[in-house]
Amino acid sequence: MSDLGDGTRCVHAGLPEPAPGDPFLPGPVLAAPYHLDPWQGPAGSPNGYGRPDNPTRRLLEAAVGELEGGDCRVFATGQAAITGMLLTLLRPGDTVVLPTDGYFPVRAFATDVLEAIGVRVLFVPTVGPYPSLEGVRLVLVETPANPGLDVVDVAALAKQAHAAGALLAVDNTTATPLGQRPLDLGADLVVASGTKALTGHSDLLLGYVASRSTELIEAVTGWRTTTGSVPGAFDAWLAHRSLGTLDLRLARQSANAAAVADLLAGRPDVTGLRWPGRPDDPAYPVASAQMRRMPGVLSFDLGDADRVSRFVEAARLVVAATSFGGLHTTADRRAQWGDDTAPGFVRLSCGVEDTVDLVADIAAALDAAGSA
Ligand SMILES: *Cc1c(COP(=O)(O)O)cnc(C)c1O
């Protein structure tokens, strides 16, 4: 399938060979234990017990693995995948590099848990400069970073990490595997939340780790089996069902983000606009070279918390909600979660509404919100 376009690959990813009378995507297999062969026991079937084995999950892993270009293991949430990868690879005395501007709960986990077990944590801004990576075990970057949307040159950083004997992991949540393929760019591991744009219907939690290294995938699989952070079969099935429209959803979200960014760039009452797809954005040179398409997420500042509330209340098509990448346009004032962003900082996730409707609604809501 690798010679085919994104839409074609999404529609077919991970589906079994067609069989007359069977659904395209087999329904969720809901089982804790499965029947065993009375003579061969667990050797008689790939399914013994639901924590390590589930056929619905394996189909989803085949699909995401195809899109990322590696082997994939799904987890109950993005946070379970990321913390699982960190705890699989890091031992007391190891050093890990994490982004200062990355997903807040990952940074909190690093200072609360990793440092407490004797892992040295170095925080570096996504854009760098990166220090010497000698003696570093793992570098985890997020590109584009959530919520600030800075990007880093993955191929260049992979070279630097490998020269120093370090592994590079990329959080691909914001871009999705259609936006960029970090394993092609030289990363050793991809981690991501499938809760966001990948599945895009704001109705499930999911995470995954992908890699081309059998050794790394086996270690991560062992971690997942012993800690048990697997998604349920129904969520895995729902996620796989949603992948078929990923290409279509991203195309509209990205087009909406471009139009909204144009609107916001022309308004003196909006500051700090960031969207890596705008030629005047600091992230543009690297993003336009390394990414296959731009995300539907942008960020900006409305000055204070009150004005953000007035803006969202006045909008008909923008709902206040955290998370991003869904069908509906959502706005999140990150500081309300205790994040270290400015009080008026907004992450706006463009949905799949008609572009003219969305732009008109946001313009009218900004007018109605008045000044800060
Ligand atoms: C949401 C998110 C996560 C965590 O994923 P959950 O599915 O919410 O656990 C990790 N990284 C990034 C960049 C995210 O946006």
Image (spheres, helix red, strand yellow):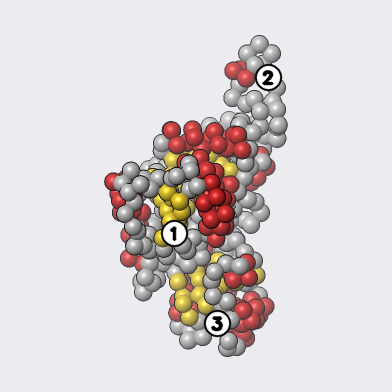
Secondary structure of the residue carrying numbered label 1: strand
Q: Is 312 in front, or is 86?
A: 86
Query: Label 3 amino acid?
Result: Gly
Secondary structure of the residue carrying numbered label 2: loop
Q: Earlier in the sequence, mark 1 or mark 3?
A: 1
Q: Position of residue 212 (x, y in %)?
A: 41, 38
Query: Label 2 amino acid?
Result: Leu
Q: Within 10 angstroms of label 2, few (less than 14), some, or many (20 or more) residues?
A: some
Find residue 277 and report its image quarter.
bottom left
User: Does 285 sit above or below residue 37?
Assistant: below
Q: Position of residue 256 (x, y in %)?
A: 51, 68
The residue that label 2 is drawn on is 36
Q: Earlier in the sequence, mark 1 or mark 2?
A: 2
Q: Is 234 in front, or is 250?
A: 234
- The response on whether ligand 1 sits within 8 Å of label 3 is no
**Residue under the point 45% across and 72% down:** 274
Alpha-carbon span between mark 1 and mark 3: 28 Å
The residue that label 1 is drawn on is 123
**354 relative position to 30: left or right:** left
